Image (spheres, rainbow, N blue to C red):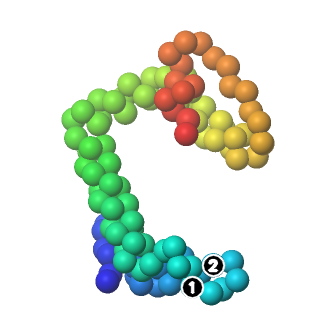
Amino acid sequence: MRLNSGDFACESSQQAEFANKGSNGSPDPLVDGSLMGKVLQRSLQMRNMQRSWEESPEGKKMLQARMSLSAFKEKKRLLQAIAQNQVIIISGETISGKTTQLP
């Protein structure tokens, strides 16, 4: 089965074959190809729904609100710091976006 969506395409049987291998290279009995295909298909559906919402008037309005938060302006630097450190402490004013703007 081939899943296509926007600029993303994957061959689910190849993905499933790779994911089905255990650490010793033998097939993992807990995961089968049909499950991986369903997971990939659902992931694509969710991504498409997110993109549609981002383009909607409500999504654009929320993005404008997020862009006004101080944490949004520092998002790239904060994400780099998180990626490079095991522990990071972020402090800031209430309603600065510390919780909502970072994963």
Residue at 69 percent across and 77 percent down: it is 23
Residue marked by disc 2: 22
In the image, residue 13 lies at what x, y percent?
42, 84
Labels 1 and 2: the sequence-earlier one: 2
Query: Of the residues shown, which amino acid type is indicated by label 1?
Result: Pro
What SS does tag 2 mark?
Answer: loop
Nearest the camera: 97 or 35? Answer: 35
**Quarter holding the N terminus?**
bottom left
- Residue located at (55% from left, 35% from top): 102
Identify the residue under disc 1.
Answer: 27
Cα distance between the residues tagged 1 and 2: 6 Å
State whether residue 89 appears in this view. Answer: yes
- Quadrant of residue 43 in the image? bottom left
- Label 1 crowd bin: few (<14), some (14–19), many (20+), radius 10 Å: some
Q: Given the image, on which type of amino acid does mark 2 rest?
A: Gly
Looking at the image, residue 14 lies above or below residue 100: below
At label 2, counting other C-alpha atoms closer than 10 Å, the crowd grade (few under 14, some 14-19, many 20 or more) is few
Q: Position of residue 46 (x, y in %)?
A: 33, 54
